[in-house]
Image (tube, grey):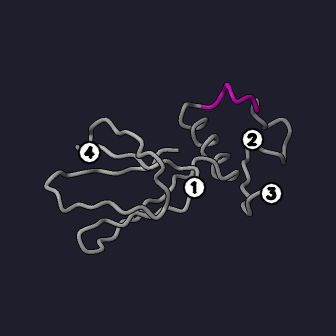
Amino acid sequence: MAPNKRIGLFLGQIASPNANTDPAFANLTADGKRLILNTVAYAVGAGTRPTLSATRVGSKIHLTWTDSAAKLESASTVGGTYTAIDNATSPYDQDFSSAQQQFFRLNK
């Protein structure tokens, strides 16, 4: 099923065929190519990132996400090496009563 998005890209001028530029993508700048690729990705729904939500429940953190294909990962520092949490499904509760800090992210 196609997403409900319509996007028009206009390359050249249709009113006068003599005024049209070469429609080859090779003539686009790097920014122009990126704009077209990002527009197409948006239109087809590609590149959407899963959302991770966290709430505190007593001495636990309650994590939820809606994308079941996303895997929950954790690390001891924000820039550290993230490892998958085996069998983690949404909702996921993690006790944080210990002094160790932990960072979470979703990977798809």
Marks 4 and 2 sit apart, C-alpha to C-alpha, by 46 Å
Q: Position of residue 46 (x, y in %)?
A: 63, 48
Residue at horizontal 26%, vertical 45%?
78
Front label number (4 vs 2): 4
Marks 3 and 2 sit apart, C-alpha to C-alpha, by 31 Å
Front label number (4 vs 1): 1
Q: Which residue is mark 3?
A: 1
| Residue type, label 3 | Met
Disc 3 secondary structure class:
loop
Front label number (3 vs 4): 4
- Taking depth in this image into account, of 16 and 95 the one nearest to the observer is 95
Q: Which residue is mark 4?
A: 78
| Residue type, label 4 | Val
Q: Earlier in the sequence, mark 3 or mark 2?
A: 3
What span is in magenta? 23-28
* Residue 4 circle label: none
Q: Which residue is mark 1?
A: 68
Q: Earlier in the sequence, mark 4 or mark 1?
A: 1
Marks 3 and 4 sit apart, C-alpha to C-alpha, by 37 Å
